[in-house]
Amino acid sequence: MNQSKAIFEEAKQYIPGGVNSPVRAFQSVGMDPIIVKEAKGSKIIDVENKEYIDYISSWGPLILGHASDIVSNGIMDYIHKGTSFGLPTKIEVDIAKLIHEAFPSMELIRMVNSGTEATMSALRVARGYTKRNKILKFEGCYHGHSDSLLVKSGSGTLTYGVPTSEGVPQKVVEDTLVGEFNNIENVKQIFKENQNEIAAVIVEPVPGNMGVIPPNKGFLEALRTITKEEGAVLIFDEVITGFRLGFGGAQGTYGIKPDMTCLGKIIGGGLPVGAYGGKKEIMEMVAPLGNVYQAGTLSGNPIAVKMGYNTLNYLKNNQDIYKTLEDKAIILEKAFNEHIEKAGVPARVNRVKSMLTVFFNGQDVVSYQEASTSDTQMYSQYFKGMLAEGILLPLAQFEGMFLSAAHTDEDLEKTIKASKKVLLSL
Ligand SMILES: *Cc1c(COP(=O)(O)O)cnc(C)c1O
């Protein structure tokens, strides 16, 4: 038995499925997981000392690559000064200011420890602010694993075919309405049927959890208009897109100002961080200013926030990085499309800026409806083929590839060569 197999067998004795987050079990690609030893730049090395060019990027956070010196700059100093106080520190102000600079719509910002916490808290605040209970989310959008949001969500729940998790009371999700992404008529209909009852619309402005899906022209604008008209809070879940599409996230890219925004992933620089914020008037509902309770022992943890701050500060001062990242993604997109055509496989590439998905699907994927008809079997074959060539792709069809500053021209060339070989063999 090789070492990774041995570690995984032992893991299964103590950890459900051997993993601390379901997708890591590699079930959807039908194999045992890679056990990571270490990583640097664009490469992950497993316990067998096999090296892979990594396009998972920890599911989005690692925009500057693995073990970046930029991100960890000065961190040992911080650790020696104490790792948690449960009291305010200056670095929390620094990161809040920086986030506000990138996201002016976030007038007040609260740090939390994960994206799940950010969306869960934002919903509570929106409900408190509007004095309404219902929320509208979109099929295939994932907003973390809090009860009321675990309805027709993407990512692992798509892969595992658990649209609604067991253990979530029917009563809790009764107030969760589900709409169709990119279908504004559907949204209008839902508002019509639930007049003055919808507290918030929460959306991934560019869904990344059913694979990458670009918003149709006008869809996000229409959401902005209708929520304003109907007195509902528009929440952009930018846990992936924040600091990924550009320094100002999806809202900066598309020029739309949501009422509230949720962040995570990149803002922690690889440590567990989330944040939510929005209009002053809404965020003043949060304790101790208002009566919506939300707290966290480790929220705003100085080490995590420092790593996040380093990342965001670098991005702020090097915004040309976004053009470079997109250029790399375009190179992959073009090559993949070429090979797909040559190989005659039913597939297409969806790309928004530096995130992309190869959908094994014969039709254009514009919403959950099409995404869900993708050939996951073929994706799994593609994944395995690529892995054998030393390329680590997302562990499921319904996830995005994320480019990082660490991906080199050589990495791209190697990836393209491998992809050609694998696609032609499918
Ligand atoms: C990852 C993700 C979350 C959940 O964040 P966690 O840190 O995993 O809790 C929420 N929303 C979106 C869009 C995400 O991609």
Image (cartoon, grey):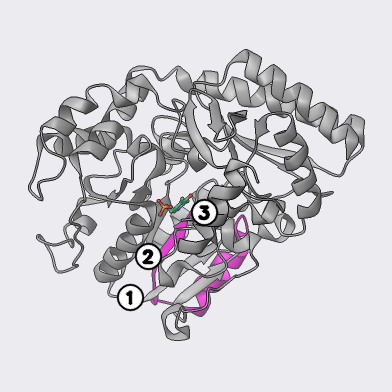
State which tag comes first along the sequence, 1 or 3. 1
- Residue 28 at least partly seen: yes
CA gap between label 2 and label 1 equals 9 Å
Labels 2 & 1 near each other (Cβ < 8 A)? yes
Circle 3 sits in a helix, a strand or a loop, which is it? helix
Could you tell me residue 201's position as x and y percent? 44, 62
- Crowd band around label 3 with a 10 angstrom C-alpha radius: few (<14), some (14–19), many (20+): some
Residue visible at 39% across and 77% down? 197
Ligand 1 within 8 Å, label 2 CB = no
Q: Which of 137 and 252 lies nearest the eye of the viewer?
A: 137
Residues in magenta?
181-203
Q: Based on the displayed image, in which of its 4 quarters is residue 248 positioned?
A: top left
The stretch drawn in magenta includes residue 184 = yes
The label on residue 222 is 3
Residue density around tag 2, few if under 14, some if 14–19, many if 20 or more, within 10 Å: many
Q: Which residue is mark 1?
A: 132
Q: Position of residue 360 (x, y in %)?
A: 79, 47
The residue sitting at 23% across, 45% down in the picture is 107
Q: Which residue is mark 2?
A: 232
